[in-house]
Structure formats: structure tokens, C-alpha cells
Image (tube, rainbow, N blue to C red):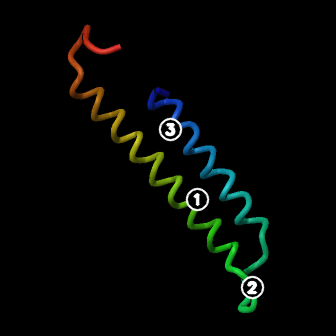
């Protein structure tokens, strides 16, 4: 199973890619699928995921005793 650092890195990468795509896309038109909005939402979800992993990592560090864990 991947460690939290790897998962956090992947989540931030997804967030960054979504941000770049969102910035490069034209505004959604009323007669088409709202792709720009969907990409923005994916970026927000990836950011929330990365922040949750960071919180978990910090929480794990606080609850792990010295000489315990990895």
C-alpha cells in the first residue's frame, strides 16, 4: 500500500493539472457540456483530498510515540 506522502503527492499533482486545464479552457457555453466547471470541481476535490491526507499525516505523527511506527 502506498504511503501517505506518495498519495498526497499524487493528489496535489491532480489538483495542479486540473488548475492548468481549467485556466486553459474557454468558459462553458449554455449549449454544451460544462467541462470547465467539471474540471474546476475535480481540482477542488483533489485539493480537499491532499489536505485530508496532510491532516492524517500530521495526526499520525502526533499519535506515534518515539521509536514506534516505520
| The image quarter in which residue 19 lies | bottom right
Residue at position x 55%, y 44% from top? 11
Circle nearer the viewer, 2 or 3: 2
Q: Nearer the viewer, residue 35 or 18?
A: 35
Residue at position x 72%, y 57% from top? 20
Q: CA distance from mark 2 to mark 1?
A: 20 Å
The mark found on residue 67 in the picture is none
| The image quarter in which residue 34 lies | bottom right
Image coords of residue 58 (percent x, y): 33, 34
| N-term-proximal mark, 2 vs 3 | 3
Kind of element beneath mark 1: helix
Image coords of residue 47 (percent x, y): 51, 53
- What residue occupies the far top of the structure in this picture? 67
Q: CA distance from mark 1 to mark 3?
A: 14 Å
Image coords of residue 65 (percent x, y): 20, 17
Circle nearer the viewer, 2 or 1: 2
Estimate how packed mark 2 is, as few (under 14), some (14 to 19) or many (20 or more) residues with alpha carbons within 10 Å.
few
For disc 1, the marked residue is 43
For disc 3, the marked residue is 8
Amino acid at each position: 500500500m502506498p504511503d501517505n506522502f506518495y498519495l498526497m503527492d499524487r493528489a496535489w499533482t491532480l489538483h495542479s493539472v486540473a488548475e492548468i486545464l481549467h485556466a486553459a479552457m474557454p468558459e462553458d457555453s449554455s449549449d454544451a457540456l460544462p467541462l470547465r466547471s467539471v474540471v474546476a470541481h475535480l481540482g477542488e476535490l483533489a485539493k480537499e483530498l491532499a489536505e485530508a491526507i496532510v491532516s492524517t499525516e500530521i495526526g499520525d505523527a502526533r499519535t506515534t510515540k518515539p521509536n514506534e511506527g516505520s
